[in-house]
């Protein structure tokens, strides 16, 4: 396939480019580099199967030649980033998804949207199944991300129903691994860089809120299986192993061997209290489930940050 990846220089986008190239596909990567970084794709420079175009996908996307698939991964993705870029976040989820879908329609290509567990907001159903409609505060600070992903899903479905575009929707749960940006503010880079620097780990709230962390290699395999499947309904892609943020802090402290203390800081507004994917649909329709143990993924991520911080 000849594939376009938006957000190619981001954490997930860059791993996806690697995965697609390893499967024998040619990739055209687009990114405006506001939260992505060229160092995430510099190892692909000179690769005949990779081309990078610096472009803001909220503007018209022009790609010559035939395209078989478009994966729309462009977006600020950490709460800190989307609070810094609220309007760009809404624009890339709305206008960017529109442009990427327009390209898919024009090229008769399949389309995959990187959606999010944030479409479930602060969920009242636990674990979250795809048929749960969510509990989102549209005007809260996180609403810019949550609503942009919800709008993106609605637009993808409209293109599917109206124009017959073969659209796929991956609802991605917390994912971690090498190439996360050390300053992106998410819990994984924060705790690891704090522990390595011998600083206390910043737990927000009482730390009893839960998350379920998926290693990036599992995630990209799930995305790939969804892309090549015939499924058009949304599919949760994540690791169902759930833990409190306090337990996660202990795990990071233990694996870094830094024995860090914990300091409690205020909980961000609308921070979801629980989050765990129900992955029955992915298991059944894609034959996919995560394989990498949290501990093994964390060790690889700690090694990455030790080399870069
Ligand atoms: N969190 C924390 N300390 C940090 C960063 C985040 O306790 O330094 C908490 C945050 O409040 C949330 C969870 O960790 O409950 C996951 O946060 P993250 O920003 O990684 O992503 P989210 O799952 O909220 O989108």
Image: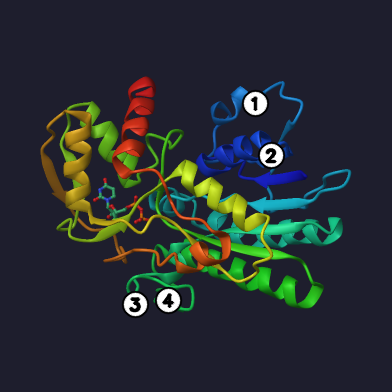
CB contact under 8 Å: marks 2 and 4 = no
On screen, residue 240 versus residue 282, left or right, reads: left
**What mark, if any, has residue 12 been given in the picture?**
none
Between disc 3 and disc 2, the foreground one is: 3
**What mark, if any, has residue 44 been given in the picture?**
1
Q: Position of residue 211 (x, y in %)?
A: 30, 57
**What mark, if any, has residue 134 been given in the picture?**
4
Q: CA distance from mark 3 to mark 2?
A: 37 Å
Q: Is residue 299 visible?
A: yes
Q: Nearer the viewer, residue 196 or 95?
A: 196
- Residue identifier under label 3: 125
Residue at x-position 68% and y-position 54%? 58
CB contact under 8 Å: marks 2 and 1 = yes
Quarter placement of the C terminus: top left
On screen, residue 282 versus residue 100, left or right, reads: left
CB contact under 8 Å: marks 1 and 3 = no
Q: Mark 2 or 1 closer to N-term?
A: 2
On screen, residue 114 versus residue 68, left or right, reads: left
Quarter placement of the N terminus: top right
Q: Mark 4 or 3 closer to N-term?
A: 3
Between disc 2 and disc 1, the foreground one is: 1
Q: Is residue 73 visible?
A: no
Q: Position of residue 132 (x, y in %)?
A: 44, 78
**What mark, if any, has residue 29 been given in the picture?**
2
Q: Position of residue 287 (x, y in %)?
A: 54, 58
């Amino acid at each position: 396939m000849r594939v376009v990846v938006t957000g190619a220089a981001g954490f997930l986008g860059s791993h996806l480019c690697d995965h697609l190239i390893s499967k024998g596909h040619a990739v055209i990567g687009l990114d405006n580099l506001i939260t992505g970084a060229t160092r995430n794709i510099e190892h692909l420079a000179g690769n005949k199967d990779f081309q990078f175009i610096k472009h803001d996908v909220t503007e018209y996307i022009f790609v010559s030649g035939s395209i078989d698939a478009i994966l729309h991964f462009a977006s600020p993705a950490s709460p800190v980033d989307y609070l810094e870029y609220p309007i760009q976040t809404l624009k890339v989820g709305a206008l960017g998804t529109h442009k990427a879908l327009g390209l898919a329609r024009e090229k008769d290509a399949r389309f995959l949207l990187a959606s999010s567990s944030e479409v479930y907001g602060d969920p009242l159903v636990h674990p979250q199944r795809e048929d749960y409609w969510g509990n989102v505060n549209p005007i809260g600070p996180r609403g810019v991300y949550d609503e942009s992903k919800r709008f993106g899903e609605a637009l993808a479905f409209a293109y599917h129903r109206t124009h017959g575009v073969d659209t796929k929707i991956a609802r991605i749960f917390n994912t971690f691994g090498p190439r996360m940006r050390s300053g992106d503010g998410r819990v994984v880079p924060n705790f690891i860089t704090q522990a390595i620097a011998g600083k206390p780990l910043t737990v927000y709230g009482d730390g009893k809120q839960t998350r379920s962390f998926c290693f990036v290699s599992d995630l990209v395999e799930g995305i790939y299986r969804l892309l090549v499947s015939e499924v058009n309904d949304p599919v949760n892609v994540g690791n169902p192993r759930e833990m409190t943020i306090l337990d996660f802090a202990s795990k990071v402290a233990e694996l870094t061997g830094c024995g860090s203390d914990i300091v409690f800081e205020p909980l961000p507004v609308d921070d979801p209290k629980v989050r765990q994917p129900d992955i029955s649909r992915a298991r059944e329709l894609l034959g996919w489930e995560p394989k990498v143990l949290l501990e093994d993924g964390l060790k690889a991520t700690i090694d990455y940050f030790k080399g870069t911080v």
